[in-house]
Image: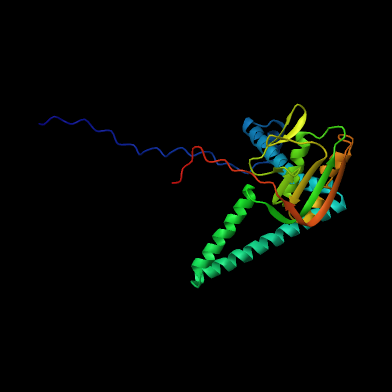
Amino acid sequence: MPDAQPPQPAELPPEPPLQPPAQGPITWRELGLSLVRPRRGHLVVGVVMLLCGLALTVQLRTPAERYTTLRQSELVAMLDEVTAETRRLEADIAQLEATRGQLQSGADASQVARQQAERRLDELRILGGTVPVTGPGIAISIGDPQRKVTTEIMLNAIEELRDAGAEVIEVNDRVRLVASSWVGTSDGVLQIDGVRLEAPYRIEAIGDPQTLAEATRFRGGLVSTIEGERVQGSVRVVGSEELEITSVVTPRPPEFARPG
């Protein structure tokens, strides 16, 4: 007889995977315990949400607080400045669209392109300070009997005029301000681009006369700073429809750049 084979054990079915216990709805008791004894993850999430809320609140309140401190006349001047800038931009858009139409029409396209190139060259010469210019603007006379006008005050005055749309600025009929201009002192005397300035200071700016004049009268601006206790000087602002600026800047030849 053949040898008897021992019985094989029956294969057991695979065990089903363990399922996480079903989570029921959070009860008020569990919610209260989480608030009284929060976990570390809850604290981290709470701190992040608090910081985000504070940042959003500061961002929303800062512009509003800035305008609530202004007087009505300052708000009106600011509105006039924005309106004038809007009109200027709309005029620029209309001119650019008209130029595009002329270039696309094909009629005298080369002549239009040449005229636009010449106009752009004239604008760059004005911005670079290499040619005399005329136009409407304001003339500011600053009396400084105690020599308390600092570089900070002069620089702020220049920046206020630029922000108000001044296209060309000249100081003391000698210094033409350009992008590379700087303000400093030497032996207690103000300097702009290395030129020593003597009081009274005269600043001429070409742009919209009304907008430029209002930019000097803001609270904390040029007029209030010069006439306040800090300087105890005087300021006189005169508008003009035909202001002439004759000082020019001699451009330096490039030292490292070469035409491509």
Q: Residue at x 79, y 52 (%)?
A: 138
| Vertical comparison of 37 with 167: above or below | above
Give the quadrant of residue 84: bottom right
Query: What count of labels does the image hold?
Result: 0
Quadrant the N terminus occupies: top left
Q: Residue at x 67, y 51 (%)?
A: 132
Q: Nearer the viewer, residue 154 or 186?
A: 186
Residue 233 is situated, as x and y percent measured from the top left of the image, at 88, 38
Which residue of the protein is positioned furthest toward the left in this rendering? 1
Kindly tell me whether residue 199 is visible in this rendering. Answer: yes
Residue 126 is situated, as x and y percent measured from the top left of the image, at 64, 52
- Horizontally, residue 45 falls left or right of residue 259, namely right
Residue 54 is situated, as x and y percent measured from the top left of the image, at 72, 39
Give the quadrant of residue 112: bottom right
- Horizontally, residue 114 falls left or right of residue 189, namely left
Q: Nearer the viewer, residue 156 or 244?
A: 244
Q: Residue at x 46, y 37 (%)?
A: 18
Residue 179 is situated, as x and y percent measured from the top left of the image, at 64, 43
Q: How is the image coloured?
A: rainbow
Q: Nearer the viewer, residue 5 or 65?
A: 65
Q: Residue at x 78, y 33 (%)?
A: 150
- Horizontally, residue 245 falls left or right of residue 112, namely right
| Vertical comparison of 43 with 27: above or below | above
Give the quadrant of residue 147: top right
Kindly tell me whether residue 57 is visible in this rendering. Answer: no
Which residue of the protein is positioned furthest toward the top in this rendering? 187
